[in-house]
């Protein structure tokens, strides 16, 4: 128990220093966080291959990096980190299920002969690029709420725990963010 408290204090101090711009502290934090997340993934997802566990670790570190500004130094670090890890573990399962649900085994793939179908991929890519650009234009609070709740598919409770923002504030931010996105996309059309 004391070891966990000591680890939490040390990681909390590293995160505070990292939020203050200390790159050395941030690198140390990421190394320790990676090890903790790796151990949690090995315990909870023992059926996974080592490369899949590393994917979960890297996705968790990327998520930690993207929401690092939301960490409240007055709160414990380990529960915050493990909430991010649990969300990434769940997202990994969803991603795996979606990927396998769309896979179709075929012996021979047909060639495309319809030019309109060939251009559909380009149009879809333009739409995706426009959406990404529009999301980046949102105010930070709205952008983070949309990223957590709509793109990462977190629950309101999970997003609230990770961000330290109330559920009501997250609902308002998502509503306003979606309204702004619709206006931006209409203006670009």
Image (cartoon, grey):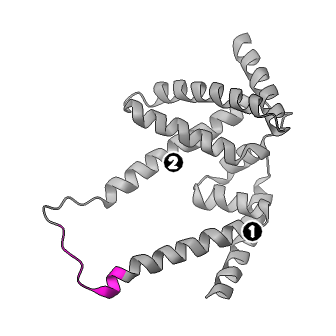
Callout 2 secondary element:
helix
Q: Residue reaching furthest left?
A: 107
Q: Magenta segment: does it hold 116?
A: yes
Q: Quadrant of residue 128?
A: bottom right
Q: Magenta segment: does it hold 169?
A: no
Dot 1, crowdedness within 10 Å: few (<14), some or many (≥20)? some
Q: Which mark is residue 91?
A: 2
Q: Is residue 15 above or below residue 162?
A: above
Residue 98 x, y percent position in the rendering: 39, 56
Q: Which residue is mark 1?
A: 138
Residue depicted at 82% across the width and 26% down the height: 13
Q: Is residue 82 above or below residue 116?
A: above
Q: Is residue 175 left or right of residue 149?
A: right
Q: Nearer the viewer, residue 119 or 56?
A: 119
Callout 1 secondary element:
loop
Q: Quadrant of residue 183?
A: bottom right
Residue depicted at 46% across the width and 80% down the height: 123
Q: Is residue 101 left or right of residue 104?
A: right
Residue 59 x, y percent position in the rendering: 55, 43
Q: How many numbered circles are shown?
A: 2
Residue 12 x, y percent position in the rendering: 79, 28
Q: Which residues are magenta?
A: 109-118
Residue depicted at 69% across the width and 31% down the height: 27
Q: Nearer the viewer, residue 166 or 56?
A: 56
- Decide whether the magenta segment is chiefly helix, strand or loop: loop
Q: Residue reaching furthest top?
A: 2
Dot 2, crowdedness within 10 Å: few (<14), some or many (≥20)? some
């Amino acid at each position: 128990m004391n070891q966990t408290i000591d680890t939490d204090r040390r990681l909390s101090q590293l995160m505070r220093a990292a939020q203050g711009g200390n790159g050395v502290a941030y690198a140390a934090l990421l190394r320790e966080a990676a090890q903790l997340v790796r151990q949690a993934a090995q315990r909870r997802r023992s059926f996974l291959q080592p490369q899949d566990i590393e994917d979960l670790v890297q996705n968790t570190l990327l998520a930690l990096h993207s929401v690092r500004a939301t960490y409240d130094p007055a709160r414990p670090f380990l529960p915050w980190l493990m909430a991010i890890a649990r969300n990434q573990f769940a997202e990994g399962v969803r991603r795996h299920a979606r990927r396998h649900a769309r896979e179709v085994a075929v012996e021979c793939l047909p060639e495309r002969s319809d030019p309109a179908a060939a251009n559909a991929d380009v149009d879809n890519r333009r739409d995706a690029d426009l959406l990404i650009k529009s999301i980046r234009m949102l105010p930070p609070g709205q952008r983070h709420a949309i990223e957590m709740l709509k793109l990462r598919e977190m629950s309101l409770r999970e997003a609230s725990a990770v961000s330290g923002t109330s559920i009501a504030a997250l609902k308002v931010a998502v509503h306003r963010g979606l309204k702004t996105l619709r206006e931006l996309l209409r203006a670009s059309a």
